[in-house]
Amino acid sequence: MPTDKNRATAAAILPLVGGPDNITSIAHCMTRLRISLRDRSLVQDEALKALPAVLGVVEDDTYQIVLGPGTVARVAPEFEALVEEGRRAAPHTITADDLAAQGAALKEAQKTRNATPFKLFLRRIANIFVPLIPALIGCGIIAGLNGVLANMGWLPAVVPALAAMASGFMSLIAVFVGYNTAKEFGGTPILGGAVAAIIVFPGIAKIEAFGQQLSPGQGGVLGALAAAVLAVHVEKWCRRWVPEALDVLVTPTLTVLVSGLVTIFGLMFLAGEASAAIGTFADRLLATGGAFAGLVLGGLFLPLVMLGLHQALIPIHTTLIEQSGYTVLLPILAMAGAGQVGAALAVYCRLPRNRSLRTTIKSALPAGLLGVGEPLIYGVSLPLGRPFVTACVGGAAGGAFVGLFHQLGVAFGSTAIGPSGWALFPLLDGKSSMGATIAVYAGGLAVGYLAGFVATYFFGFTRQMLTDLNTDPEPTTPTSPEPTSEPALA
């Protein structure tokens, strides 16, 4: 049964990451199981990569095990349950003090190498918005379905209901952003949500700031983000200076009052100007830059995915969706996944005798076609080195194609974020006809597939790589795609 399979996968992973007492926290995103470790040295990397369900591992602020979309959402609860069961069964197997002493040097070295202020800031921004992605996807798909029904004149009684479902979350997204922001920055989440709620309150239209009448929603998610960060700082100041006997009354009152006034008479206007600037820049970038802008965006997106920094673009996408109903950037960035698919197909053709690598490609390809590139990145192209670069070439070509047509007048975007590849078709919307929109996006995918394939087939391997890789690996590592030496990628 599926549950047994997912539990078996979790049970296979757990001892290879040091057992229950080596785990300090567990989370997951769309494709990765993210765990925090007490002692990194207890992890058996090679054995972990050799598991059939594991598509790759990534070391960042957490240890990330790539399982793929769908799978990770089912394995993660089983993994959490096994960790809890293991702790109850043997609570004193490993103590926190022992593990801290053993792993302090490795942990500190890893943090020093990766935790630059800029990267930490981007990860925090991503942590705020990633939990919102399921709702964005669901509401976006409902919005697309509602548009089809409205255009076709079908089920007129259902259309208003679907519109309410699709728009309800987006109308209050600032509250959720405020809540998550306060939680991420160490404040009281509900106070962050309370301050952010001011932005979407209808009565805000009666207030004037900077000589202009404010409007509900002005500043959007950027205003909510800034307001909640300010609320956290005010709350922390209050916690330090307000007497403990008065804290329960004074701290939340001052937090909402001070942050709320600054939000109303400053942040909403400034964030509104910033949001408008983002929308104007995105439109002008593609209207004037066209193919070149698409080439750069499509070509650079895979490295961002590799580093996990692509999630920092979520606030920009969300801002564009708030303004125009869709984000024009996502269809272009999605071309990076097309280049990755083309590159993987070329690897499959160039290495006919490497059965384990071809098996990995076949298992990861469906996810790649749906726009989830991490299994192919970490299981195929990145370990090989050169095919990762040629996959970026394919993404650049597909991005240039879509960007060119945007400049020619076929401007469109995605009504939600999260899906990509073929899964993005139901979410496409724009100023042109749906037929033209679908044709251009499909054409971009085709160009990305072809360019990624051709670039990888002819330039993705040296002669030595073909000699070393075009053999059947040892049977003890049937799904490992890595060559004997890790390529150097800056």
Image (cartoon, rainbow, N blue to C red):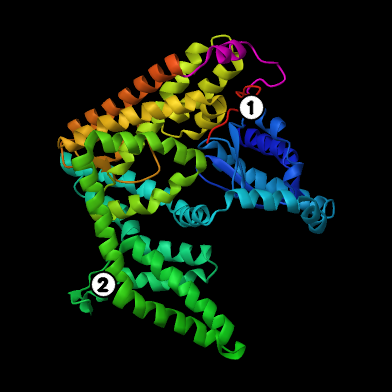
464 part of magenta stretch: yes
Residue at left 51%, top 37%? 70
Question: Disc 2 and disc 1: Cα gap in Å?
Answer: 53 Å
If the image is split into quadrants, where does the N terminus sit? top right
Measuring from the top left, give residue 17's x and y in whole percent: 72, 41
Give the camera-side residue of 276 and 176: 276
Give the camera-side residue of 60 and 70: 60
Give the camera-side residue of 357 and 370: 357
Q: Is residue 436 left or right of residue 489?
A: left
89 part of magenta stretch: no
Write the start and end of the magenta stretch as one range: 460-479
Tell me the SS state at disc 1.
Answer: loop
Q: Mark 1 points at which residue?
A: 52
Q: Are marks 2 and 1 in contact (CB under 8 Å)?
A: no
Residue 426 falls in which quadrant of the image? top left
Measuring from the top left, give residue 177's x and y in whole percent: 42, 61
Crowd band around label 2 with a 10 angstrom C-alpha radius: few (<14), some (14–19), many (20+): few
Measuring from the top left, give residue 382's x and y in whole percent: 53, 29
Give the camera-side residue of 328 and 460: 460
**What label does residue 78 carry, if any?**
none
Residue at left 37%, top 26%? 394
Residue at left 21%, top 78%? 206
Measuring from the top left, give residue 20's x and y in whole percent: 75, 48
Name which residue type carries label 1: Pro
Q: In this view, does 208 lie to the left or right of 456?
A: left
Name which residue type carries label 2: Pro
Residue at left 52%, top 71%? 188
Q: How many labels does the image show?
A: 2
Q: Main secondary structure of the magenta part?
A: loop
Question: Counting residues from the N terminus, which is met first, the one under dot 2 or under dot 1?
Answer: 1
Vertical placement of 454 versus 22: above or below? above
**What label does residue 202 carry, if any?**
2
